[in-house]
Image (cartoon, helix red, strand yellow):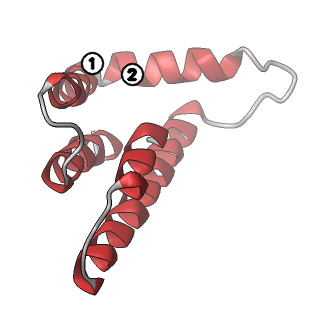
Amino acid sequence: FDRLREAAAARSVGDLYERMAVRRLIEDILAEQAALAAAVIAHAGSPDLDDPGRDVATVAAWSADRAKAVKSARDTLEEIEASPGGWSFAKLTIANAALRGLSGA
């Protein structure tokens, strides 16, 4: 999520509408991160503050339960990052959509 927001923020955009679109995309990326965190937290159940290692186990368990969706999102992000030309607005939008699919998985 950090890399996507940084790539979006680094885009040099032209007119007011392009700047607004980038700002909205960054807001969407933040919202997707929050939704994904909420999904993982809901999966975890009640917190055990005495066991910080539980966080890693919770994320691993959540990911394992959604292995197909996680793999699909990871593959999409890796394909975009490996493609030539850097992060375009279109690539950022597709990456955000791939991550959006995770929170509902």
Residue located 78% across and 20% down the image: 52
Label disc, if present, on residue 63 of the rendered structure: 2
Indicate whether 18 appears above or below 42.
below
Indicate whether 46 appears above or below 93.
above
Residue 79 placement: quadrant: top left
Identify the residue position indicated by label 1 in the image. 67
Q: SS at mark 1?
A: helix
Residue 71 percent across, percent down from the top left: 23, 20
Q: Residue furthest right?
A: 50
Residue located 29% across and 85% down the image: 16
Please indicate whether residue 5 sits to the left or right of residue 104 in the image: right
- The answer to the question of whether label 1 and label 2 lie on touching residues, with beta carbons closer than 8 A, is yes
Instruction: Identify which residue, 25 or 8, lies in the foreground.
Output: 8
* Any part of residue 32 in sight: no
Residue 17 percent across, percent down from the top left: 24, 83
Mark 1 residue type? Ala
Please indicate whether residue 59 sits to the left or right of residue 18 in the image: right
Quadrant (top left, top right, bottom left, bottom right) of the N terminus: top left
Indicate whether 54 appears above or below 77.
above
Residue located 45% across and 47% down the image: 6
* Any part of residue 68 in sight: yes
Residue 46 percent across, percent down from the top left: 69, 37
Residue located 37% across and 46% down the image: 7
Distance of mark 1 from mark 2, alpha carbons?
6 Å
Q: SS at mark 2?
A: helix
Mark 2 residue type? Ser
